[in-house]
Each structure stands twice: as structure tokens, then as C-alpha cells.
Amino acid sequence: MSELPEGVLFCMGNPLLDISAEVDKSFLERFGLKANDAILAEEKHVPMYRELQGKTDVDYVAGGATQNTCRVFQWVVRQRDRCVYMGCIGKDEFGNILAEKAREAGVNVRYQINETTPTGTCAVLLTDGGTHRSLCANLAAANCFTLDHLLKEDNLKLMENAQYYYISGFFLTVSVDSMLHVGKHATAKGKPFCMNLSAPFLCGVFSTQMMSVMPYVDILFGNESEAAELAKAQGWPSDCTKEIAKRAEKLPKESGSRLVVFTQGCDPVIVIQNGAVTEYPVERIPKEDIIDTNGAGDSFVGGFLAGYVQVQKTIAECVALGVKCASMMIRQSGCSLPDRKSYENALGF
């Protein structure tokens, strides 16, 4: 791989410590949760966190969707500090763990520290042997990120010096003004700005915020469930992911065209570019090899972007790299990065 500039990719998101455990369907029902969904925690979910922490088989993994993507991106490119990440954590042990794991992966983290609010956590509830996951996030400090942190001289310089930008849709609930600041800068300078739909509820409940950022989005990521919810919120037919992707490409845009990339689990990845639809097959993984689907989508984006920042890579190659990273992550517990050398042949560099 060619040498990449430091800070080539700039990201913002919600840094969370994942509390991961396998549960049965009755556990989900008891707390009003669904498989393959992602929501923000409510008061009724507080006892659930205590119950999870009391389990003997619980795992604590550095998480947060965008931070997962950053760690995978760094894992692929193997050049430290090529990715800059901002988000808000608490001044506590969980925050220290997140910072340590991110730096170990080579991410240049520039956290905002909130001294009165604890670091955010996310319950990762696995069912059916890990093939389905339900996410319930207690944002806590992650919800406290403010635009003034981005505008600090050193941080702003990092943002402006980047060549590519990625922010997950989850950040729409935290700091839309920060997303807009980055999006407008990227558009003005002709640099790609990427966003992920991230969760079905964001496409509906936070539709206004999402549509305010959408004109600046050059690459839109999502999965089939999120696409269906986007369609409902926009009043489109919601039974065909390809048609939804075509409509998403045509949403208002400040300049240039939009690339839409929708994953569909074990079904082909749908890509819309300049009105043309391309489907890319994915590796079918035997059920017995699937350990944990949490982080698969984040890993796909990390791999895709690791290819995309190398301008000689085609979209097909970027998708293939994303699929390889997602396939790798499904075989791990949580968004845990395996030994890089064992994957060099599969990754192609």
C-alpha cells in the first residue's frame, strides 16, 4: 500500500464501551427490544444494564459505530494516525479503556472530556448463537459533544487538513451543527463526505436532522432495514432495496453526484453510481462460524474507506475489501481486531 497522509480520514461519533452478552428471546421481550435493531436507552432499560453486568459471560469491548470503523480502517492501512476521531467520553475508567484501545489500533483520538458525566455504554444483546444482535445505547457522555470542541484551533486544523470525512447517523442525535460544519467544509473544498444511516429509528424519528445533512453527503451507507425505514419516512415504496437506493441517490445534493452503498446481510451489496445499479456478491459464512454479527456493518465501512482513500482503487475493489472486513469481524467476539498478518493474503495488501 502507498504511504497515506496523516489524518487523511476525519471521523466523529459516539464512543461507547460495548457490554456484550448472549441472551434468549425472552430477555429481549422483557425489555421491549427487537433482534437486529438499534435504539437509545430509556429509563426502563436501566435494570437491564445491571443484569448484564452481573452475568459471568459478559464481554467488555471498545465500541461505538464510528470508532469501530476507525479501528478497522487503521487495521487495514497499517499506518498510524491516518484516521482522526472525535467524540465525547467521561473522566473515568471506561473512558480510559476506550482511549487505550483506539490508540492501540493506531487511531488519533481527540476526545472531548466531560468531567461530570460517565462514559457511554451500549448493551449488545446476541441471540440465535450470535447471528442476530440488538443494540441499546446509553449515550451518557457521548451525548455531550459540542461544536466548540471541533472549533478548537488544533482540532479544526486536523479537520480541515483531512481529505475524506465519515460520520455515522448516530451523531445526528448529538451534534447536528458539528456534522453540518464538516459537511459544508467538505463540499466547499470538493472533498468526499460520507454518512451512514446507522439505525432504522434515525431515518424516522430524526428524519429532519438527517435531511439537513443529506445535501452534503457524497457517499451514503446503510443496510436493508435502514433503507426500508428511510423509504417510509420519505413516503417511498419500501419493498425493494434497489429502488430505495435509486431514490436516495437523487435526494437533494449541494454539488456533484452521490454514491449509495446498501448492504443486505448475506445478500448482494447494492451500489448506485450515476443512476446505474451494480450488485456485488458477499461471502456466505456457515452458521457455525458466526460468532457475533455486531460490528459487521461498521467493519464493512472501515474496509471500504481503506480502499477508497487509495484513489487507484475501483468501487468494486472497495466493496470487496469491505466485505472481507465484515466477514472477518463476524468470526470475532465484538468488534475485536485479529492478527493482521493472518489476513494479508485475503486483503490483498
Image (cartoon, helix red, strand yellow):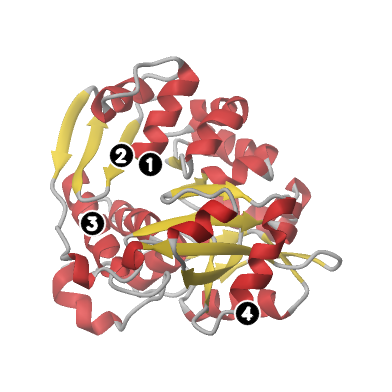
Mark 3 or mark 1, which is nearer the start of the sequence? Answer: 1
The residue closer to the viewer here, 297 or 76, is 297
Residue at the spot of label 4: 54
Mark 4 or mark 3, which is nearer the start of the sequence? Answer: 4
Could you tell me which residue is drawn at 48 percent across and 72 percent down?
21
C-alpha distance separating marks 1 and 4 = 36 Å
Q: For mark 3, give the secondary structure.
A: helix
Asked if labels 3 and 1 touch by Cβ distance under 8 angstroms, the answer is no
**Residue type (three-letter) at the residue carrying disc 1:** Phe
Residue at the spot of label 2: 261
Residue 248 spot, x, y in % from top left? 37, 25
Could you tell me which residue is drawn at 46 percent across and 39 percent down?
197
Could you tell me which residue is drawn at 47 percent across and 55 percent down?
134
Residue at the spot of label 3: 323
Q: Nearer the viewer, mark 3 or mark 4?
A: 4
Name the disc covering residue 221, or none.
1
Mark 4 or mark 1, which is nearer the start of the sequence? Answer: 4
Answer with the quarter of the image where residue 201 lies.
top right
Asked if labels 1 and 2 touch by Cβ distance under 8 angstroms, the answer is yes
> Where the C terminus falls, by quadrant?
bottom left
